[in-house]
Image (cartoon, rainbow, N blue to C red):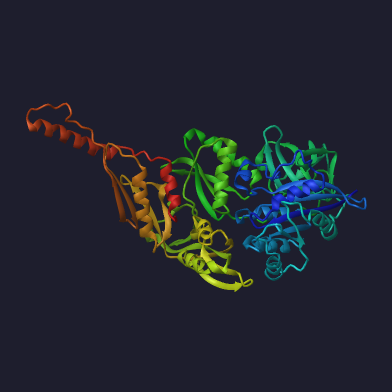
Amino acid sequence: MPNIRNFCIIAHIDHGKSTLADRLLEYTGTISSREMKEQILDDMELERERGITIKAKAVRMNYTAKNGEKYVLNLIDTPGHVDFTYEVSRALAACEGAILVIDATQGVEAQTLANTMLAKNAKLKIVPVINKIDLPTADIDSAYEQMKEGLDVDAEPILASAKEGIGIGEIVDSIIANIPPAIVVKEEPLSALIFDSFYDSYRGVIVIIRVFGGRIRKNMKVKFVASDVEHEALEVGYMKIKMVESDELSSGDVGYVVAGIKDIRDIKIGDTITESINPTKHPHEGYKEINPFVFAGLYPNSASGYDGLKMALEKLKLSDSSLVYFPETSVALGFGFRCGFLGSLHLEIVKERLEREFGLNLLVTAPNVVYKVKTRDSIIAIDNPARFPNNADIGEIWEPYVKATIICPIEYLGAMLELCQKRRGKQISMRYMNTKITVLKYHMPLAEIIVGFYDALKSVSKGYASFDYKHVGHQQGDLVKLEIMINTEVVDAFTIIAHKDKIQTVAHYLTEKLRSIIPRHMFEIPIQAKVNNKIIARETISAMRKDVLAKCYGGDISRKRKLLEKQKEGKRKMRQFGRVEIPPEAFVAVLGIED
């Protein structure tokens, strides 16, 4: 039995995780140079377009050391963006060690700090790597200093350039020398952790597992502990870019299981697989249930697309377990789903994947957070602004707050402080990592950062600042509900919750934007913004006028007046009974409020 090392690569976004994974695959001979392409583990079209990792990917590498010793290296490449932290935490649970990558040109950034803390909490052995040392702007001494002081990592870092292939051998040697080998307990009952899954049209649900005890063989009867269902393991194997079938997976291995699972609800990420006739007494405790922080409505463009959207969400949930959804109905948009996300990028990625992978055409309502409202009778949680109670029934409103960590160069400090103050942030601390870099910590309302904040942060810092946040509960806020009425009818999809100081600006922006987007009809359309039954902004779309006098040649003026009066009466009835067609782009207008 060869020695097994299970490890993942963690870093801030764009610090070179996927490129390092490419070099490791080449160095160990897992993939030939003919088959090689950049970011080979990022097989999703969206990942390659954006240059970011969205899904954690597992791959097995067989390696023979210079002394002839054989090793199995199980690598998991993880995402770097804060919205996909749950992917990282799931990968860490399947590993004994982590390669921590730090960009020599950027130094320690916010997500580097967050991922290092996750790895330490999971008690993993950390192998630090300072990457991109070949670039002219690389500052190795500064990156080393930030790593020692900011991350409290004592191990000597390996200097590398994943792009040029520098230091790859040293990294592999360090993995073997420093990361603890997987503990092999083959004689124990089967205990395997499900840390990922995906759907195959022909074979059903395929689960990715880490075996902690015992072994799983082809045709073995297995039981899923949490869902309490039994299946037969039709195929087992490991991931080597492609799926490679094997006779069994034993303790310490990472691989996949095909069990002909057609009912998607049988699978729960974090569940334990065990043998039916000899179940384990120590199932994995499972992953901590994650609460979504940002909610938005997803609706098909036509009523016939509802079933397709429902099936697509069920399949997407398998590969993205942090997604939460439940049915809802909108007066304006019909039947759809209220979906919960970990952030605005997560929302954007899910929408893109649904449209590309499942061929859907979707409308997305403005993202919002979960508020807590104290009424006369109780305290209720509200994830949809349209369900907010009347103002007379509200005692207090609490909104979710986050503790934001911003790392930026000192020359942009003034602009950063101004941005955070504008977004209702309260400064907790400010410290200098060295003479060039400062670390800011703020308490901020989550509602202020889910739309436009990340773009604004990159804009004021010319791309040099980094940002990470974690949730710290709810705080009382001076918030009001803004409703938009089109032709005297409230359109629930445009309802938003905003701070009292900003409500007037938001109302004027929305009414003006909708006036420019909604096409003219045969009747006049008033667009009104309402707060507590008081109109605070109004715009009017003027009616199109048909020339009813075109065929009226000469004659008495009373004849012309009669035609005009008849037209006026018709328009009055139209306005009373007519339906205003709202184009899809009008619902996107709400997303641009912060811009």
> Looking at the image, which is closer to me, 140 or 156?
140
Residue 558 appears in which quarter of the rendering?
top left
Q: How many marks?
A: 0
> Looking at the image, which is closer to me, 546 or 533?
546
Residue 27 position within the rendered picture, expressed as x and y whole percent measured from the top left: 81, 48
Residue 566 position within the rendered picture, expressed as x and y whole percent measured from the top left: 17, 33
> Looking at the image, which is closer to me, 364 or 457?
457
Residue 285 visible within the image:
no
Residue 200 position within the rendered picture, expressed as x and y whole percent measured from the top left: 68, 36
Going by the picture, which residue comes out furthest to the right?
Answer: 67
Going by the picture, which residue comes out furthest to the left?
Answer: 556
Is the residue 208 above or below the residue 160 in the image? above
300 left or right of 570? right
For the C terminus, the image quarter is bottom left
Is the residue 427 above or below the residue 520 in the image? below
440 left or right of 302? right
Going by the picture, which residue comes out furthest to the front?
Answer: 136
> Looking at the image, which is closer to me, 460 or 112?
460
Residue 528 position within the rendered picture, expressed as x and y whole percent measured from the top left: 32, 50
Residue 320 visible within the image:
yes
Residue 277 appears in which quarter of the rendering?
top right
Residue lying at 56% horizontally and 69% vertically, measured from the top left? 410
